[in-house]
Amino acid sequence: MLLMKANRDAILKPLQTVAGIVERRHTLPILANVLIRKNADVVSLLATDVEIQISTEAELGGDPGPAATTVAARKLIDILRSLPESAEVSISLDNRKASVRAGKSRFALQTLGADDYPTVTVSEDTTTRFTLPQDRLKHLFHMVHFAMAQQDIRYYLNGLLLVTDGDLIRVVATDGHRLAYCQAEVEGAGLARQEVIIPRKTVLELQRLLADSEDPVDITVAPNQVRFAFGGVEMISKLVEGKFPDYQRVIPQGYGKRLVIRRDDLAASLGRASILTTEKFKGVRLAASDQGLKVQITNAEQEEAVDEIEGEYNGDPIEVGFNVSYLQDVLGNLKVENVSIEFGDSNTSALLTVPDDESFKYVVMPMRI
């Protein structure tokens, strides 16, 4: 049976949309596959790793009758990528094998039964539902994703906290050494206060799939599950269980020392100084005074980098050590002219914000150097 017949890119695009979550190694071999269902001209594609599920649909021609199978996602993508962009590709199902043809090229792939594919059950118990433009949600994730932990034993840190509260949507990420916070307003939303933790992998995949457009994302939160629907794509993800740290207590209040500096100048200075850091030692010393900011690094080989940059500073002189990567991460994600850094003393966290913008906050712990 002819499952689909279309231009290479028409097949490749929806396949790449769903296959991003497919891992190369699985305890269940079928999880390396993508589920293909056909009904008339409409082909639905679905992939899951049991924790996350992504599905989409496309009109891709072929025979009209219903059919369903699963085929190795990575192999199929690699085959399609290897074909010319202008190639017309046909994929047919015959005797438990998927046959891919384009011009004089032919590939036969093993399939596994669609009935054995472990799809995620959609929860019917909705607790919160709201809509955001795709570019707004992508921006929120972009501003905090870099502060998520990666494989922390405190599993609740390996994700992003999403908070709904009235007309505000807040996102927070922390790895225990730094914390990033961003918020957006949804006029008239009137949402009940709720906190859920979205897994790291889900956040990163959404950043890949969301467009820089004002097209809506429908977000539905249910017990232990969240659903994102946008642009013909549906993503369902389990939520991380556990209690996220109280971010409001972590964000400093009322600091008296404040430095306003050009973002590009600070990023360039840290980039120069970090040349002398190593994988084991990432410490950088910042000294703020009326003269501006001095950036200094001394490594284990007693090599030294010193850089001085202009800035507006209010307060007594202060010198604090930080992990240079934590500062570079936030500066690399901010697209602003100036940043503000507020200090308490040499043993307390610093607060990095954007002048005249209350929506973003970044807290970084000091480092003994």
Image (cartoon, rainbow, N blue to C red):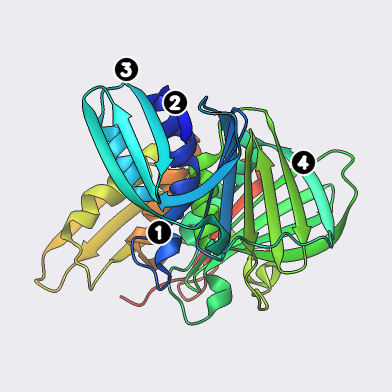
Look at discs 2 and 3 and give the one toward the viewer: 2
Marked residue nearer the N-terminal end (2 or 1) = 2
Mark 4 closeness class: few <14, some 14–19, many ≥20 residues within 10 Å:
some
Question: Residue 329: image x %, image y %?
Answer: 40, 53
Q: Is residue 277 above or below residue 332?
A: below
Q: Quadrant of residue 286?
A: bottom left
Look at discs 1 and 4 and give the one toward the viewer: 1
Q: Nearer the viewer, residue 16 or 228?
A: 16
- In the figure, is residue 9 to the left or right of 192? left
**Which residue is rendered at x = 31% and y = 30% of the image?**
101
Q: CA distance from mark 2 to mark 4?
A: 35 Å
Q: Secondary structure at mark 4?
A: strand
| Residues tagged 2 and 1 counted as in contact (Cβ below 8 A) | no
Question: Residue 203: image x %, image y %?
Answer: 55, 54
Q: Amino acid at mark 4?
A: Thr
What residue is shown with label 1? 32
Q: Secondary structure at mark 3?
A: loop
Residue 131 got which mark? Answer: 4
Marked residue nearer the N-terminal end (1 or 4) = 1
- In the figure, is residue 237 to the left or right of 101? right
| Residues tagged 1 and 4 counted as in contact (Cβ below 8 A) | no
**Which residue is rendered at x = 68% and y = 73% of the image?**
246
